Amino acid sequence: MRAPALGRRAYALAIALMALFGSFLVATRADAATSRSSGGAGVVSLPPPDTGGDLPPAPLTTPLPTAQLSADGRTAIPPATAPDQIKNVIYSANQITTKPYVYGGGHRTWKDRGYDCSGSVSYALHGGGLLTSPLPSTSFMRWGLAGKGLWITVYTNPGHAYMVVAGLRFDTSGPGQSGPRWRKTPRPPLGYRARHPIGF
């Protein structure tokens, strides 16, 4: 004899309620175990929030012994073997390679609309933690130590300053646009004093 439809429904409802109550018991026991393991604080570990891929990519380096000009022609890639200060000098210089040449630029404020020669050098060195305040080219003639450095050499005279970082020249003048740029061609150092930061 078949059970009435109402009885079958009540039976199915009872089974569903029992399954739901069983799930509740399992979750309650898991929460209690978590509370005990955390000293009774009832703290439940949550997975880290999804950033949605918004974290900035790690800065690029090159396995070559010298800095390389990027494909964009504007930014430089430091050697992986360079000290962090040198990498940061290069990354800082990269931030202003779209700025124009402005006489006196970079001397009253680090963030300026444009930079002159010594302002550009000052900005990059400051980014690497090697300079606390901007210097004019004449002051660079007494800055640091005399001679070429292992990683950085600032070439300076009373009228101009530029530097070579990990083998790549950072200068406001030369072939192409004026303004702070990485330039692949060397510049004859005749008439300039070579200075370098202590240790680099």
Image (spheres, rainbow, N blue to C red):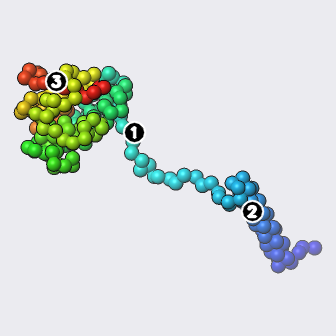
Relative to 39, say whether 11 is above or below: below
Relative to 58, say whether 64 is above or below: above
Q: Circle 1 is placed at which residue position?
A: 58
Quarter of the figure with the N terminus: bottom right
Question: At label 2, which amino acid type do we have?
Answer: Thr
Question: At label 3, which amino acid type do we have?
Answer: Ala
Quarter of the figure with the C terminus: top left
Q: Which of marks 3 and 2 is in front?
A: 3
Q: Look at 65% across and 57% down and name the residue there.
A: 44
Q: x and y percent of residue 8 in the render?
A: 83, 73
Examine the image and state in which quarter residue 28 appears: bottom right
Question: At label 1, which amino acid type do we have?
Answer: Ala
Q: How many other residues sit within 10 Å of disc 1, few (<14), some (14-19) or many (≥20)?
A: few
Query: Depth check: 116 or 59 in front?
Result: 116
Examine the image and state in which quarter residue 29 appears: bottom right
Q: Which of marks 1 and 3 is in front?
A: 3
Q: CA separation, marks 2 and 1?
A: 43 Å
Residue 200 left/right relative to 42: left
Residue 125 seen in the figure: yes
- For the image, the number of numbered tags is 3
Q: Which of marks 1 and 3 is nearer the N terminus?
A: 1
Label disc, if present, on residue 28 of the rendered structure? 2
Label disc, if present, on residue 194 of the rendered structure? 3
Q: x and y percent of residue 35 in the render?
A: 71, 58
Q: x and y percent of residue 76 in the render?
A: 26, 33
Q: CA separation, marks 1 and 3?
A: 33 Å
